[in-house]
Image (cartoon, grey):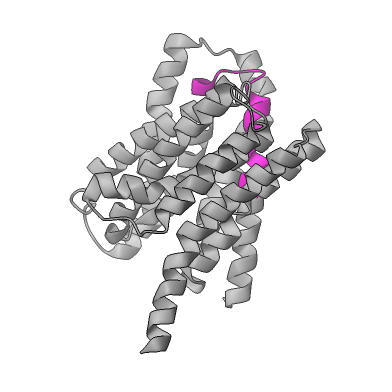
Amino acid sequence: MTRIQADFLLLFAAALWGVAFYFQKDAMTSIGPWTFIAGRSLLAVLVLAPLAFFEHRKSGARALPPGLGPISVVCGFAFLAAAFLQQEGLKTASVTNTGFLTSLYVVLTPLVAWVWSRVVPPRIVWPAIGLSFAGTWLLGGGTIGGSGPGEFLVMGSAVFWATHCVITGRASHYQRPLTYTALQFAVVGSVAAVAAIAVESPTLDGLRSAAVPILFVGLVSTALTYTIFTIAIRHTTPPEAAVILSAESLFAASAGALMLGERLSAISWLGAGLMIAAVLLVQVWPWLNRKALRGAE
């Protein structure tokens, strides 16, 4: 695969992730967040389990690497918390705002890594955080109380998405991405199913009404896009991949506009632009710095 082909695949994945916000919101009209999370996760497990099995056979090992199971469980709970807050927020937050606010996890990831493993974040993180806060305020209209409860829940989910990202980074040395993901979603699906039965009492009619969103998010934006990401990331650079994947929020805005008629005011677009700038600063600046230092040598 060439680098250009890999970049186009990543752009395709970003588009699918962005459009998925529409289906996630649509599902909330028929079922609760726990039911939706259980459905999408268990469906993803069904798809990923055979791939994980072949990955394990290809490794030639008789058992899973020590520690892979526990870290998959921890990461599963981080994903569960993030997904629940995001789904609950989507009940009132727009698809457009959810896409941009979720992207805050990129800026928060260095801070979570700092707390998790004492890895000092690069200095560029601090101005990026300032841009993010300014962008969030402007996205809400630039007024006190401009953001509703749904937006605050989505902001909370970004903290757990960042935590999920840090844990996944720690798990990468096991070199079992498909096994790790399948185990993670097995945890998410099982816990969410128990929660759904306990507090939501899902019905067949509700599941039938939400079948398309569950199928899209479970098969397309989870199983398919993860596989695309795993393949494509090997043939491009991390900063380049980050820039391309940051387009997810723009695809979410497009989906909200085309499918739900959502519109942002000029000041909200300014806020969205500041948030994207913060994401790009965190991802690209350290790479540019290293490249400049190498050139100076």
- Which one is in front, 281 or 232? 281
Q: Which residue is drawn at the image coordinates 77% and 33% (left, top)?
A: 262
Q: Which residue is drawn at the image coordinates 60% and 49% (left, top)?
A: 274
Q: Is residue 34 magenta?
A: yes
297 horizontally vs 251: left or right: left
For the stretch drawn in magenta, the main secondary structure is: helix
Quadrant in which the C terminus appears: bottom left
The answer, for residue 87, to whether it is visible in the render is no
- Which one is in front, 118 or 191? 118
Q: Which residue is drawn at the image coordinates 47% and 66% (left, top)?
A: 285
In this picture, which residue range is highlighted in magenta? Answer: 16-36
Quadrant in which the N terminus appears: bottom right
- Which one is in front, 240 or 19? 240
147 horizontally vs 266: left or right: left
Q: Which residue is drawn at the image coordinates 28% and 53% (left, top)?
A: 170
Question: Within the image, what quadrant is residue 245 found in?
Answer: bottom right
73 horizontally vs 130: left or right: left
Q: Is residue 106 magenta?
A: no
Residue at the farthest bottom position: 297
Report x, y in % for residue 158: 46, 38
220 horizontally vs 234: left or right: right
How many numbered marks, from 0 up? 0
Residue at the farthest left position: 66
Report x, y in % for residue 40: 53, 33
Report x, y in % for residue 60: 27, 64
Report x, y in % for residue 18: 64, 45
Q: Is residue 234 above or below residue 77?
A: below
The answer, for residue 33, to whether it is visible in the render is yes
